[in-house]
Image: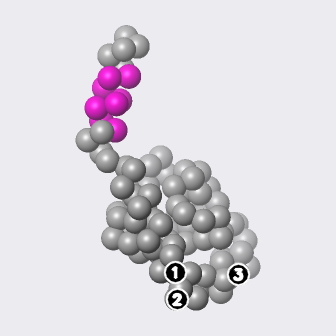
Amino acid sequence: MFASTCENLPFILLEAMSFGLPILTTNKKPMQDIVYDEGVIFDIDNPKSLETTIIENINEEKLVKISKENYILSKKYIVKDSVRRSIKFICDNV
């Protein structure tokens, strides 16, 4: 569970995904944009939402699917590529 409300790029979340762990996270950006399946997102301001999200995702088969999809998604975030693209963007726009 990743219950942060303020992140720029949540490396902890990406690291967990890269290990194939199932993720439940907040409805705040960018967390909701990074993880697989809207069903794993809870409203951090609503404790009942967290409870519901946990109950709906406790099924082992669903957790395995979430884990596999998160692992695949995590491979899109390669730090070296991001640094190169950022430097290129800056150089092209100076």
| Label 3: element kind | helix
The amino acid beneath tag 3 is Thr
Q: Neighbour class for label 3 at 10 Å: few (<14), some, many (≥20)?
A: few
Q: Farthest residue to the left: give it.
A: 80
Q: What number is the disc on residue 7?
A: none
Viewer can see residue 76: yes
Viewer can see residue 3: no
- Give the residue at x 28% y 32%: 84
As measured in the structure, the alpha-carbon distance from the residue carrying label 2 to the one carrying label 3 is 16 Å
Q: What number is the disc on residue 52?
A: 3
Mark nearer the viewer, 1 or 3: 1
Circles 2 and 1: CB atoms closer than 8 Å = yes
Q: Neighbour class for label 2 at 10 Å: few (<14), some, many (≥20)?
A: few
Tell me: residue 43, above or below residue 94. below
**Magenta part, dominant SS:** helix
Residue on which disc 1 sits: 63
Which residues fall within the magenta stretch? Answer: 82-89
Q: Position of residue 78 (x, y in %)?
A: 32, 47
Q: Position of residue 28 (x, y in %)?
A: 62, 56
Q: Position of residue 9 (x, y in %)?
A: 44, 49
The amino acid beneath tag 1 is Leu
Q: Position of residue 51 (x, y in %)?
A: 67, 82
- Give the residue at x 65% y 86%: 55
As measured in the structure, the alpha-carbon distance from the residue carrying label 1 to the one carrying label 3 is 15 Å
| Label 1: element kind | helix
Mark nearer the viewer, 2 or 3: 2
| Label 2: element kind | helix
- Give the residue at x 41% y 61%: 72
As measured in the structure, the alpha-carbon distance from the residue carrying label 2 to the one carrying label 1 is 5 Å
- In the image, taking residue 53 as reference, residue 25 lies left or right, namely left
Residue on which disc 2 sits: 60
Task: Of the two numbered discs 1 and 3 on the same chain, state the one appearing first in sequence.
Answer: 3
